[in-house]
Amino acid sequence: MTLFPLPSTSDPAEADESTKRGEQARALCLRLLTARARTRAELEAALAKRGYPDDIAAAVLDRLTQVGLVDDEDFAEQWVRSRRLNAGKGKRALAAELRKKGVDNEVIDGALAGIDAGAERTRAEQLVRDKLRREKLGDPDDRDAENKVARRLVGMLARRGYNQTMAFDVVTAELANERERRKV
């Protein structure tokens, strides 16, 4: 008795088209990942923007996640390390950037857990010190000029995601240190 395979209910041309679209989606993701690491949400958005169906996008992204090319936790840790070192960002700004990139809150919390208040304050002090070296300080008795410099520095730290109270404390202390340094 010879068994014959059951006839396929799906159209072979449709299966070929689906496979072709899957390969195109995979190629797009790999090309995007070549430039820099990306989150799953960023890749989903790129695939959706180019009109790939959700099922193909999900299959491609699941496979890339499975082989380790898409890892939101690793991305978040690298992003935090890089942005703290190069841009001097604070916790609040880093969390906002990661949320914008589609990273889950639990992953964000895990990535930011390594930053303690002391390290954040030290980085803020360093940023203010670097900025103050280039800042022209007027007469020590001119409160308006000193307040203007202080507002600028507190604003710089606030834009980088630092707590306003800590920023004000750091700026006040560093302004006093810089004035003392320039007296010598």
Image (cartoon, rainbow, N blue to C red):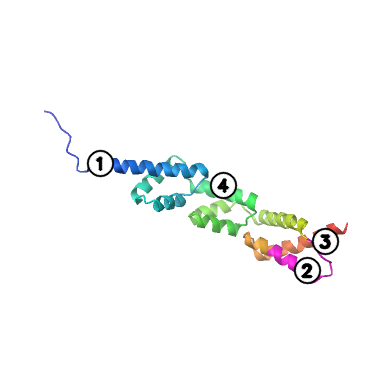
N-term mark: 2 or 1 = 1
Name which residue type carries label 1.
Answer: Ala
Residue placed at 53% from the left, 54% from the top? 108
Name which residue type carries label 3.
Answer: Arg
Quarter of the figure with the N terminus: top left
166 shown above or below 52? below
Circle 1 sits on which residue? 13
Q: Residue furthest left?
A: 1
Which mark's residue is nearer the viewer, 3 or 4?
3
Circle 2 sits on which residue? 145
* Image location of residue 21, percent across then percent down: 34, 44
Name which residue type carries label 2.
Answer: Ala
N-term mark: 3 or 2 = 2
Density class for disc 1 (Cα within 10 Å; few <14, some 14-19, many ≥20) is few
Circle 3 sits on which residue? 179
For the residues marked 3 and 2, what is the alpha-carbon distance in whole angstroms?
Answer: 13 Å
Let me know if residue 63 appears in the view. no
N-term mark: 3 or 1 = 1
Q: Is residue 151 left or right of residue 114?
A: right
50 shown above or below 156? above
